[in-house]
Amino acid sequence: MNTFQNFITSIRAFLFETGELAFFAGRFFKEVFNRPFEWKEFARQCYHIGNKSLFLVAITGFIIGLVFTLQSRPKMIELGAVAWLPSMVSISIIREIGPIITALICAGRIGSGIGAELGSMRVTEQIDAMEVSGTNPFKFLVVTRILATTLMIPLLVIMSDAVALFGSFLVENIKGDVSFTLYFDEVFRAIKFSDVFPATLKTFFFGFAIGLVGCYKGYYCKHGTAGVGKTANAAVVEASMLVFILDFTAVLVTDIFTS
Amino acid sequence: MNSDRKPVIVIKNLSKTFGDHKVLNQFTMELYEGETLVIMGKSGSGKSVMIKCLIGLETHDGGQITIMGKNLDTMDAATLNEIRTEVGFLFQGSALYDSMSVRENLEFPLRRHFKKFGEIGDATPLVMEALDSVGLGHTIDLMPEELSGGMKRRIAMARTLILKPKIILYDEPTTGLDPITSKEIVLLMKSIQQTYKTSSIVITHDVDCARFIADRMILLIDGINYAEGTYEELDRSQDPKIQAFFKK
């Protein structure tokens, strides 16, 4: 009985949280069109999110490109399909691996950062101070951050894809003596608009989800400094889950339109 | 004494409950123009909750709050924000925006109230005026982390003053400060009140602060205004609950 009650409580809490998150997203869409827009803070957030994550995303992308090619190569040779390696690697990276890995890294780095920053502002009454001075903290803190993640995460994914392909090329160049021109000629021959467009489009949703969850968790942070740590943690977990759900949905929708 | 003065804040029968705990129980008070009202009470007596209800940071369960003739419960968000430019709030922990410099902290509210201040090009003279009024003009380009506790409290006062409020609410202004800095803050509060002719509500349990600054005092015990009067009147009271606050 107790287990059943706990289950019901968990379901209720999940539904409540989902509703609150949807309401928070609704408030974002309402506030985003209200003037004046906080351009300066938006630019600062874009710099902060983009620049500070660049190195981590680039390194990860590079290693993924290297490892993916190193591990696929022997099997491709065995099957006599090594010439297809650039095509296979590029399609895998652009359609799935690049976006999902970059989004998960950003959920960990950016989502938790936003959650912790806004959470500490909440518990030290900085958000309350903005509110009592008659300003709109939601617009200044939340709208700018969600827009910045929505814009910057697709750019980070594009950069990560490019670096991953370069990593893959290096392996092919060293192991298979494939030239730069030949490798990328194969890559661009394999990639179609139907690969790039849905893969890029879904990264905007990933960015939006990461910003939304980070801001939501931080904005309503409770229970003092201990709550800030929990908020950062919850922001990562929930943003990552949301990224997977969005990815699955995007793949299903793409499949419907392309099949 | 107050019959010829206009009340700027009127609270009637304010109630607030957290779970089963009734924090405010039919609390009633008035703040008059130019007056400094000190509200004293033990920790957890509902002082901070009351002041947060007053500015709309907490919702109340019952009762009525009127600020400068306008009912807080019936006003829309735009009116509430206009009212908030007339009511400054000094937080217990200063609540400076730690990602912004002192200059940006002061400019932040100033640049977002076009109705009251218009478009402001160079805000430096206004920022300097506010900083000079708290004696910290030299800190304009410092970050909050470079300031001491007392300096943060003063900068928070300057950030409040820059909006030229008619009412200032102080939430435990001397808590966490050493006696010398506390005295400086109290002197500054007095000087602000005299210079800007503001009405103030000061939430504190610092008796020395209350003695120096209060025109009138309210003792908040168990969510009700248990006693009201000047410092001297309350100090003379033989009621043990009142005496508990004043005995040295």
Image (tube, coloured by chain):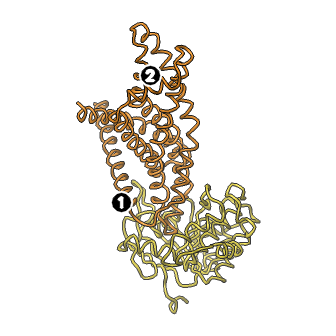
Chain colours: A orange, B yellow
The answer to whether residue B244 is seen in the rendering is no
The residue at 54%/59% (across/down) is: A40
Which picture quadrant has residue A202?
Answer: top left
Q: Chain of mark 1?
A: A
Mark sitting earlier along the chain (2/1):
1
Q: Which residue is mark 1?
A: A30
What is the distance, in whole Å, between disc 2 and disc 1 at their CAs?
A: 45 Å
Task: Identify which residue, B183 or B143, lies in the foreground.
Answer: B143
Looking at the image, do the residues carrying marks 2 and 1 touch, with CB atoms under 8 Å apart? no
Q: Position of residue A42 (x, y in %)?
A: 51, 55
Q: Chain of mark 2?
A: A
The residue at 52%/51% (across/down) is: A118
Task: Identify which residue, B8 or A163, lies in the foreground.
Answer: A163
Quarter of the image that includes the N terminus of chain A: top left
Q: Which residue is mark 2?
A: A86
Q: Position of residue A128 (x, y in %)?
A: 51, 61
The residue at 42%/77% (across/down) is: B66
Q: Position of residue A254 (x, y in %)?
A: 28, 35
Quarter of the image that includes the C terminus of chain A: top left
Q: Which amino acid, by three-letter code, is at mark 2? A: Pro
Against A102, residue B19 (above or below) is below
The residue at 53%/75% (across/down) is: B119
